[in-house]
Amino acid sequence: MTRSPNSPTPVPATTPPEALRHAKGWTLHAEASREMVGVLFGERFEVREPIGAGGMAAVYVCKDRALHGLAAVKVLRDDNADARRRFADEARLLANLRHPHMVQVLAVGETADGAPYMALEYLPGQSLDERLIRRGPLPWREVVELAAQVAGALEALHRVGVIHRDVKPSNIVQIDSAAGRPVVKLIDLGIAKIHDWARVQAGGFTPVPRHKTEVGKVVGTPGFYPPEVALVEADPRFDTYALGVTIYQLCTGVFPTPGEYRPMVEVRPTCKVPPELEALVAAAVAVLPEERVATAEEFQRRLEAIRIAHADDAEPFLFDGCYELIEVLGVGAKAEVYRAYHRDAARYVALKLLSARSKASFEERVRFAREARVLSAVSHPALPKLIDCRTATSRKQPFIAMALAKGKRAGDLHRRSDARAGRLDRGREAARGGAGRAA
């Protein structure tokens, strides 16, 4: 299935969102579907139903016997050596680059007949491509919110020299959020460009070299790659261009014409985008690379400025009447954590909310309440300080507000000469905190 850059109606891309139960344009023969149900991958992932299949891979919703949840298992169908290398690279990238707005990989392995697979977190939701097709263009404020999250994920990739090369609505999945705030995850790094594996991975692994993309060869989805795609090596401007096209399409329902930019408010007057967003998107899709938004970090910063400048009475979303949710710090199966601003206390906090699935479990609610009591009773530098909590088992949305710690996660710190000593020091500190908690 192909796209026409100027088509008035968005057409779904051929690459499937792993989160979707049935992606448009994807089919599986009924007989093959029935045969796969119940198949076990790696003695862990039991097939419940197929999501879909294309020329390169098939994706299944599976029961994760180890974690007692769901997973989306992607099985490579193409036995081409380069396809296998790219498949393995995608899994390693996702394993080494954790970000709240990127899909996470749970495991990798091979099926009984030797086909490689990767198990990804199951994302209950729909791609922005599907949402656009079913419900039409999105409100510009929501587009700004979602695009800022994608820009954050891209900034994390670019920081270690990785270019996604396939940013588009069908590779952005909107998931259910405990806070009611729109949240998305970027998926499918199958054609990502890795400039330097040493920056991505600290374990010393050297992947099998693969052929560089030849000059003149185009990689990506028509309409989303920049004009210079066949002439130069991929750089961050490839992704900022694609994000600009994505915003334009989500706000108007059509693609911008390269070199003949029509303002979004002319294409669709009811979208009512502000001049700052219009200027940002026009710069993102500029024909000349030097005139384009240079980095995902700049893109995210300008989107956040637009959101703040044009907040109305209902925006930004206030949780529990006083917490302004700024950004997602982490999304897991059991909880979500946000950087939030307590308007009454005038301070930033880390706000932890139980996920929809955990809220339905009395046992998880009890564990959550116990966590709050431990944080309240124990004071230690290795543990976050409790600021506020509402954890009654009858409460609609339990939450814990903790002091916002500055710095980076231990897993994000890649040290060289003193790596081992640093890990031991952090481990001792964490152990002391654990001892205090047990006491």
Image: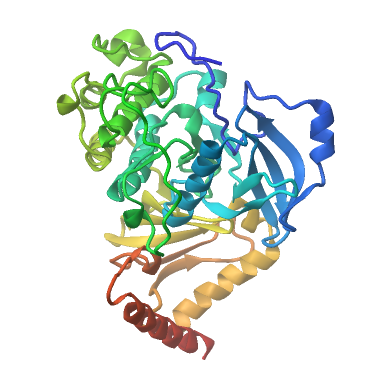
Question: Can residue 275 be seen in the rendering of this structure?
Answer: yes
Q: Position of residue 167 (x, y in %)?
A: 41, 31
Which quarter of the picture shows residue 74? top right
Which quarter of the picture shows residue 24? top right
In front: 32, or 135?
A: 32
In front: 401, or 279?
A: 279
- The outermost residue toward the bottom is 439
Q: Residue at x 38, y 33 (%)?
A: 165
Please identify the quadrant where the N terminus is shown. Answer: top right
Q: Is residue 132 left or right of residue 196?
A: right
Q: Position of residue 155 (x, y in %)?
A: 31, 45
Q: Position of residue 403 (x, y in %)?
A: 35, 69
Question: Can residue 378 be seen in the rendering of this structure?
Answer: no
Q: Relative to 236, say whether 414 is above or below.
A: below
Q: Position of residue 124 (x, y in %)?
A: 61, 42
Q: Relative to 208, say whether 173 is above or below.
A: above
Q: Is residue 20 left or right of residue 404?
A: right
Q: Residue at x 30, y 13 (%)?
A: 265
Q: Residue at x 59, y 38 (%)?
A: 18
- The outermost residue toward the left is 290
Q: Relative to 426, say whether 79 is above or below.
A: above
Q: Residue at x 37, y 45 (%)?
A: 153
